[in-house]
């Protein structure tokens, strides 16, 4: 919860990758689960910079890996990032540098200050990427899960501690 224009509103976080079927729905579903478990007033959504998979559920392999760890992401549906998302969200997380560049290309200098690399939450300033698992094997999905989990827990810790408000 944060105060804007004198009223309490939930903090809003957007997770963005390329297709919005692998990495960002994992981050979106993970973050939703964490804030629910911790009873935090935070809204979470996901988007892709590309339109190829709009309306699709998460990739079956990403869904399976998430579910093995007790995270259901089957209900999410892909949508494309739009410039209006800069106004709707407080923090926009890019999974890789290409996503970051594609998002910031759509924003004003003020707006692009909201965009961060997800893994900078656990490796500050390094601009490390969540690797795209789409064309690889199952181990890529497990690696995405572990990175995303660690970053999302850190984000929740920072919101709870008041570092992000
Ligand atoms: P994501 O992975 O960006 O993590 O959702 C991809 C999904 C689909 C494609 C590329 C990346 N694609 O080219 O269709």
Image (cartoon, rainbow, N blue to C red):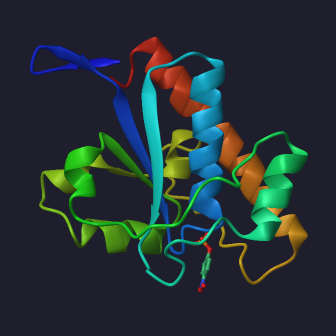
- Residue 4 pos. (x, y %): 16, 22
Q: How many labels does the image show?
A: 0
* Horizontal side, residue 107 vs residue 55: left or right: left
> Which image quarter holds the C terminus?
top left
Q: Which residue is drawn at 62% across and 68% down?
A: 21
- Residue 6 pos. (x, y %): 11, 14
Question: Up-down: is 1 above or below 152?
Answer: above
| Ligand 1: quadrant of the figure | bottom right
* Horizontal side, residue 85 vs residue 108: left or right: right
Tell me which corner region of the image, top left, top right, bottom left or bottom right, holds residue 84. bottom left
Question: Up-down: is 37 above or below 112?
Answer: above
Q: Which residue is drawn at 44% across and 79% down?
A: 50
* Horizontal side, residue 123 vs residue 22: left or right: left
- Residue 130 pos. (x, y %): 62, 61
Say whether residue 130 is visible: no
> Which image quarter holds the N terminus?
top left
Tell me which corner region of the image, top left, top right, bottom left or bottom right, holds residue 135. bottom right
Between residues 86 and 105, which one lies in front from this camera angle?
Answer: 86
Question: Up-down: is 100 above or below 121?
Answer: below
- Residue 115 pos. (x, y %): 33, 53
Q: Which residue is drawn at 43% across and 34% down?
A: 43
Say whether residue 63 is visible: yes
């Amino acid at each position: 919860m944060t105060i804007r224009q004198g009223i309490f509103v939930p903090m809003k976080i957007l997770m963005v990758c390329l297709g919005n079927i692998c990495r960002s729905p994992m981050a979106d579903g993970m973050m939703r689960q964490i804030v629910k478990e911790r009873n935090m007033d935070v809204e979470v959504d996901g988007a892709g910079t590309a339109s190829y998979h709009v309306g699709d559920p998460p990739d079956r392999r990403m869904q399976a890996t998430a579910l093995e760890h007790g995270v259901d992401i089957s209900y999410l549906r892909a949508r494309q990032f739009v410039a209006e998302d800069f106004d709707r969200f407080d923090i926009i997380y890019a999974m890789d540098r290409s996503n970051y560049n594609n998002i910031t290309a759509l924003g004003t200098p003020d707006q692009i200050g909201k965009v961060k690399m997800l893994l900078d939450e656990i490796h500050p300033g390094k601009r490390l990427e969540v690797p795209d698992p789409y064309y690889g094997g199952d181990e890529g999905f497990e690696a995405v899960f572990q990175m995303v989990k660690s970053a999302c827990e850190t984000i929740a810790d920072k919101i709870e501690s008041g570092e992000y408000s």
